[in-house]
Image (spheres, rainbow, N blue to C red):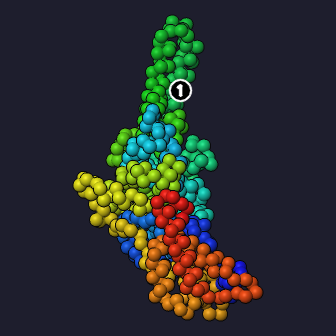
Amino acid sequence: MKVHQFLDHFGISENPFSQEDAASDHVFKGHCLEGTHHPAWDKIYGDPKSPSTSVVFGEQGSGKTALRLQIVNKLIQHNTDHPTERAFIVEYDDFNAFLDNFRERLSGSNRKPEKALKNWRLWDHMDSILCLATTRIADLVRNDGKSDDLPSMSLGSEQISGLSRQQKRDLLLLAAFYDNDRELAPDTRWATLRRKLRFTTWSTWKTLLIGVFITILAFLGVYYFGEKTGIGWFSRWFWGAIAVGWIPYVYRLIGAQWTGWRVSRQIRVIDHATSNLRKILLQFDKSELNGQPVPSRARGDDRYELIMRLQSILKTLGFTSIVVLVDRVDEPHLINGNAERIRDLLWPIFDNKFLKHPGIAFKLLLPSAVVGYLNRQEAEFYERSRLDKQNLVQALAWTGQALYDVANDRIRACAKLAEKPPNLQSFFADSISQAELVSQLDRLRAPRHLFKFLYRLLVDHCSKYTEDQPEWKIQPNTLQVSMTMFLRDLENYDLKQGTG
């Protein structure tokens, strides 16, 4: 007996339990994004109009990525319904590029995987988030406001033109430091952004033109009046005049080179070339750069100021809040699920000033492997992080009842051929009550374990019968044996001795 034959009997067109990863689960994306939520959903999601931070710890398979997808989906709906009060979405879930660049900046034994992340600081997180946000905004402006992946994030031409000159300057300054679109060369993408913003910078040529003008005057003076004055081509007065004419430009050039070098050293999560930064910084008038925040020191003050400049720009573009979604922190190859390295990466972000920054909501979807470290910190950590104010969900636990509802939602989503949609109870013999079934599911803890178990259970049941003599009800003995075997494998997985 084949599994699809069993499912066809109930009018189910595809196996509801064949997928295990929410990121590639078409059943979840197509049918369960809105209807299937964890009981703590309201606490985690909050209200985009009044952004709040949430910190969630959950084991692998407990639905953290599903939560992220649901939050994004809900925010898209919010943005569609409230075009002037949108939430700007930053998905901070791919750390590999940031960590690779960061590690390249380290030297000696600090580059070893077990030591590298001990050098990670809060401002590295801030730089990463600024990079993601700035790159998206810059891409939107370069694409005339169009957003193919998230149409609700698109910009109108009137919104872009509504930016003040100061805000355009701020966006170009942010782009100089944090725009990381690799499809274009740094100076090309910055020049394209400047052109789209219609930001003129003619005054930046002033010092260069002074140098050229004085050089031409010096040559003409020697050519026409050299014999009368006694000043020749090799006279110190001739070359001195030229040197004086070029002093303002050389001064600007050295200043831009120095600033670019310092920024390239301090922004450790992006691969910056000092020469590219110098070329871009020379495009700003000195008067417009004086007093502006530049991330050239190992501190967070400049980054906080740049975040506020970013928020001001976004407000004009129709975004009243920023939602930063942090997920998959255990997946980068520099971490590979190691709990200590996850801790080293995460601990700097637990800063109450940062997590409670006005207008920003952080949704930290974190692995439960680091909860043990969380409970063994010194008083200073708790005072700095103030996790009691961060909507903390210490365990993303699922009860048997919640898992039963998840299974039913997926079955109904796939029961396209059934006149009356079945539920999970329909698969089992009458001698198995709903209460007993819920009690069994309670032992599985997480949706991924639920899907794996039910998929295995269907295979175990169908393997006991032939196509000619099918059995449409799973018997108690099959349920007990399959559950015992699955829990044994799950225990081995928890002990890192099996695949689960």
Q: Which SS class for mark 1?
A: helix
The percent coordinates of residue 380 (x first, y second) are 24, 53
Instruction: Judge the density around disc 1: few (<14), some (14-19), many (≥20) Cα neighbours within 10 Å.
Output: some
Seen at 33% across and 58% down, the residue is 374
Seen at 47% across and 56% down, the residue is 329
Q: What residue sits right under mark 1 in the picture?
A: 213
Residue 435, placed above or below residue 110: below
The percent coordinates of residue 31 (x first, y second) are 58, 78
Where, quadrant-wise, is the N terminus in this rendering? bottom right
Q: Quadrant of residue 385?
A: bottom left
Position of residue 467 in the picture relative to residue 240 (left or right)? right
**Disc 1 residue type (three-letter):** Phe
Seen from the viewer's position, the closer of residues 111 and 304 is: 111
Residue 396, placed above or below residue 281: below
Q: Quadrant of residue 481?
A: bottom right
- Whether residue 93 is visible here, answered yes or no, is no
